[in-house]
Each structure stands twice: as structure tokens, then as C-alpha cells.
Image: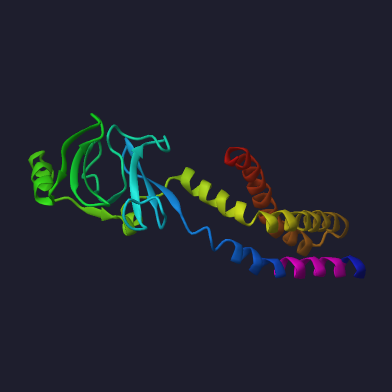
Amino acid sequence: MSQELRGRILSLVLILGGLAPSVALATVGFAETHSRLAYNDLAELDWVHPGDGCNVGKTCFFLEKKGKPSGWFRDLYGSMRRVSVPPGTGVSLVLGEWSAGGWFVYDLRDESYRTKSASYEEALALWKSAGFPEPVLADAPKLSRYFRETWASRLEGLTMLALLFSPMIVMSLPFVLLLLIWSLLTFRRTKSKSFLALAALLLVPAVLGLFLLLRILAVLPKAR
């Protein structure tokens, strides 16, 4: 590598390093986070933490049909504060508390209420009358203790993060690809394993950067 090329690469690294704090500050306003958590074979939880979509407070969740974002169950609208952890597979009955207050028991399969706007004691009695034990209640700030995030939600979150940092990704990707090609060509010429190791190290960010760039390009038309 020539001295001039080394100088240019070093300058590019310093420029990108200087951009990092600016990009980080630009993301401060994007505080609202949505995650989709697997609830059971019928439903998912759209978890807002924190955000402005809650009826009351900044942390809540919505119970929606599995695999259908914004796919509401009939009459089951509004944000929730607590929900029962399914006591077994195939259980469609849900005991929950609205963010604005009030308890309910709802059948996801029939899409109908067993009781609505009830006290906890009344909802609990109906829950137990169906043959279920004392419910384990997951509240909005701690949903991840009981439910796992779906892979689609994780990918979407990673894509949105990449979208926020897209200026850095776009600017650094050519540098990474150029250095990767140079490492492979140098290894081919010198057979030095150190250049092969460098190429292997650069392959991960290069592939990840290209993948995220393609995801960003796929998301942009939908955002419009």
C-alpha cells in the first residue's frame, strides 16, 4: 500500500469517527420503540417502551393477531398494562388490565369477552372457574421476562437502527469493500496469512453493511 493511499484511508477513518457523535445526537429524538413478542399460537404483543401510543403512561402493549401487524381482535382495542402468561399450550383465554384501568377476560379463539371492565376479583373468579390456576401476570415494563421477541421484530428493529445510521453505513461501506478487495489481492500475491485474516475480519462488516443497505432500500418506499 502506497504512503499516499495510507494517508487517504487514515483521513477517511478520522472523518467517519468525527461523524459518529453527530449521528448519535440525531437519534436522540427517536425514543419510541415497538417490539413484537410471541404470546401464543393466536396472538402477539405489540410492546411500546416507551412511546406516545399508550392510553395512559409511556409503557404499554397491544394484543394483536399473530403475524398480522395492527390485526385487531374483535372489540379488543386499547393499550394494556398487564396480561396473564398463558398457563399452557392451546389456551385461548386471556386475563388482562387496561392502561386506563379495568380488568377483562377475553377468548382469543372466539373473539369475545367473558367479562369486561370488571374488578380484578371478578375477573380472577371467572378465570379460575375455567379451571386455571392463579394467573402469572406480566406487566408492561417487564414483558421480556416472560415472552420472547419474534425474529421478524428483531430484524425490523435492526433495520430501523441501520436507517438512522445510514449516512455512516453508506460512507464507510466503500472503504470497507475497498480494503477487503485490497487484502484479498495482496494475499493472492504474497500468500501471507495475515492479509487473509484481515480479509476474513472485513468480510463480516462488508456483508452486514450490504445486507442492511438492501433492507434500508426496501423499507424506504414503504415509509413514503
* Residue 24 placement, left or right of 72: right
| Image-quadrant location for residue 94 | top left
The residue positioned 81% from the left and 70% from the top of the image is: 10
Q: Residue 209 or 111: which is nearer the viewer?
A: 111
Coordinates of residue 9 in the picture (x, y in percent): 82, 66
Scheme of image coloration: rainbow
| Image-quadrant location for residue 115 | top left
The answer to whether residue 91 of the structure is visible from this angle is no
Q: Which residues are the magenta region? A: 6-17
Task: Note whether 8 is above or below 57 in the view shown.
Answer: below
Coordinates of residue 193 in the picture (x, y in percent): 77, 62
* Residue 134 placement, left or right of 96: left
Dominant SS in magenta: helix
Q: Residue 42 or 168: which is nearer the viewer?
A: 168
Q: Residue 144 or 105: which is nearer the viewer?
A: 105
State which quarter of the image contains the N terminus. Answer: bottom right
Task: Look at the image and say whether residue 210 sits in the magenta stretch.
Answer: no
State which quarter of the image contains the C terminus. Answer: top right
Residue lying furthest top: 110
The residue positioned 71% from the left and 70% from the top of the image is: 18
How many labels sit on residues? Answer: 0
Task: Look at the image and say whether residue 11 sits in the magenta stretch.
Answer: yes
Coordinates of residue 207 in the picture (x, y in percent): 67, 50
The answer to whether residue 68 of the structure is visible from this angle is yes
* Residue 100 placement, left or right of 26: left
Task: Note whether 28 is above or below 85 in the view shown.
Answer: below
